[in-house]
Image (cartoon, grey):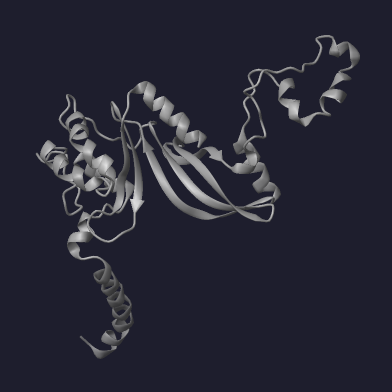
Amino acid sequence: MPLKRILCLLPFCLLVLPVFGQVGNYLDAEEFYARTKQVNQFIRRFNGEEDLKGVRINTKDKTYRSQKLRKKYLPQLIDQQNQAIVDQLTAFGVDIIEGKPAEFLDFYSPDWFAEVHADVRFEGRNMPITFFLKLEEANGGWKWVIDHIQFAPYQGLFDMERTPKEFLNPLSHELYFMPLNEAMQDPARLEDYASKNYTPDVLTLFLYDMKRGRLQFKGVNNVHLHFFQLEGWYFELSEFNRSGKNAGWLISNLVKAGTADKEKLKAYILAQ
């Protein structure tokens, strides 16, 4: 190779070599392949749609979604340091993998959502906020959208649980709705004058405060995914950044749950 070409390639080689060196320092090849590096990879491994080296399996291949491959993968897809999950793994595998029909995860199913913990600055203070996002179809594709939030300053602003005591007299229109003057003097009871179909929307408050500059987004801290797709079971998926083969995106919570139990779990997660 001409000297001029070698000199041109040398800077690229110097950039690439340290990268491989860094990877080698932290992960050997076996650890690298064992680690579930992406959520989509977790789904493929759970379903038995890729081999142990991360190569996608042809749908016509006999190993595609095979019980043998899925059983081999399953112990690698849980947090093995959580004994409660380990103790349920056999029953989970029997129901999901050996059941008739077998159960698989579907990326496009409505029965999963993301829980995103982040930091914001609100009225001069750094504060935590939690976003709940779901997949939504749009323009022939899909996108994640914010469906709900939890933010301490917004909690307690609306009391929709108590029975309304205040109301506008049905003849208020004859008084040019003058009773509104008195109604607006007590902010604690404003909900009494709203329609019975009214539901407070804290997401609107968040968007308003962002637009007004009262609230600034700082960044995401961590993510959890909640799966309700599998018959009779719920599980949570979290990322474990640690050394060893049992790392990456793993099942961090596993609960045997029927339909009614799942609804209670959803309500609990969204209300925390």
Picture quadrant of residue 241: bottom left
Residue lying furthest bottom in this view?
3
Picture quadrant of residue 182: top right
- The mark total stands at 0
Measured along the vertical axis of the image, is residue 181 above or below residue 25? above
Question: x and y percent of residue 35 in the render?
Answer: 25, 55
Q: Residue at x 52, y 51 (%)?
A: 118
Q: Is residue 3 left or right of residue 218?
A: left
Question: x and y percent of residue 59 in the render?
Answer: 17, 39
The quadrant of the picture occupied by the N terminus is bottom left
Q: Residue at x 26, y 85 (%)?
A: 6
Q: Is residue 97 left or right of residue 84?
A: left
Measured along the vertical axis of the image, is residue 269 above or below residue 16? above
Question: x and y percent of residue 14 in the render?
Answer: 31, 81
Question: x and y percent of residue 148 in the render?
Answer: 53, 36
Picture quadrant of residue 68: top left
